[in-house]
Amino acid sequence: MSQPISYIARKFIEENIDFVIAKVIETKGSAPRKRGAAMVMTPEGNFYGTVGGGLLEAKTQDLCRKVMETREPITYEFILDEQQQGENALAMGCGGDATVEVEFIDTSNPGNFIEEFKLKSDAYVFGGGHVAYALEPLLRHVDFTVTIVDDRQEYSNPERYPGAKRTIVCEDFDHCFDEIETDDDSYIVIVTRGHRGDLAVLRQALTKPNAYIGMIGSRRKNSLLYEELKKEGFTQEQLDCVHAPIGLEIKSETPEEIGVSIVAEMIQVRAEKAEREMRFREVSNIHAD
């Protein structure tokens, strides 16, 4: 399912706005969109996302309106062939089939929807020391799944982080991404025990898709690392995307306070990204009309 739709759905759930979700769950032959394409509808009748456009989109929107009224799910198989006859046949030249599932989501009781639709962002915390120990439970409480990465077994293990999605012990921080595949909804937190570890992680992080990179350390220390990376060919534009010193400025001192400042900044970045995606979808819908 598309990441922009996940941002929109998360925002609806956070604001207690019930909605309808339509998903392509199966296709046969030629179809405009494949399995996983999705569209959501608000109570006001606004649509975000797409299941394929044309008559398929129009008929699916009709199903969404019906489900919004009845709150009863519908699964419907469309025949996308202008040569076929019948209630579920659409005059489209695709020549395939598309099965669409439409479901009402009660945001007070979303069930398995949060996990299914990936409404939890992935946070990768590099360094398993005091700051990570304070940060990890905070991230879980605000809907991040957390992976801890360290080059020391005693600082990255399920006993130390029982609530983490995963703990990884890397050979060294030069190979810390070997078992990780990030995407544009990944949040990278760099809190290793020294500037060499921070540099190794940042060097790799700058080449990976992400929504956020934050690095601990003073401005002076970070500027020295940036100069080294510039010599290696990284641009100022790339470095400007790094949140360093990490976290919002709340005069934090203890690991627990630093953890609060970091998670607050990550929440802010996530919310701003969701708002951008929402505005983009609204503009797209206007143009489509």
Image: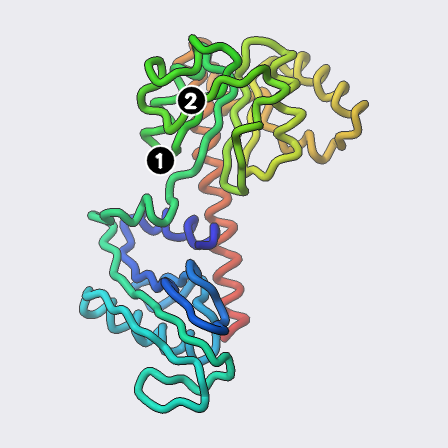
Q: Nearer the viewer, residue 32 or 39?
A: 32
Q: Nearer the viewer, residue 223 or 185?
A: 185
Looking at this view, is 72 or 83 the one in front?
83
Sequence order check, earlier mark of 1 and 2: 1
Element type where label 1 sits in the image: loop
Residue 40 x/y as whole percent: 37, 61
Residue 76 visible in this rendered orientation of the protein: yes
Label 1 environment density (alpha carbons within 10 Å; few <14, some 14–19, many ≥20): some
Q: Which mark is residue 143?
A: 1
Left or right for 44, reference 126: left
Give me the disc on residue 289: none
Amino acid type at mark 1: Asp
Q: Tell me what residue is drawn at x 50 percent, y 16 percent.
A: 150
Q: Secondary structure at mark 2?
A: strand
* Quarter where residue 63 is shown: bottom left
Give the number of the disc on residue 167. 2
Q: Residue furthest front?
A: 29
Mark closer to the observer (1, 2): 2
| Residue type, numbered disc 2 | Thr
Name the colouring of the figure: rainbow
Residue 173: give x, y in percent of width and height.
59, 17
- Marks 1 and 2 close (CB-CB < 8 Å): no
Which percent across, then down, holds residue 115? 32, 44
**How many labels sit on residues?**
2
**Toward the viewer: 224 or 275?**
224
Please say if 286 is above or below 181: below
Residue at 46 percent across and 19 percent down: it is: 250
Q: Is residue 40 above or below residue 245?
A: below
Residue 11: tell me if it is visible.
Answer: no
Inter-mark Cα distance, 1 to 2: 18 Å
Residue 207 x %, y %: 66, 34
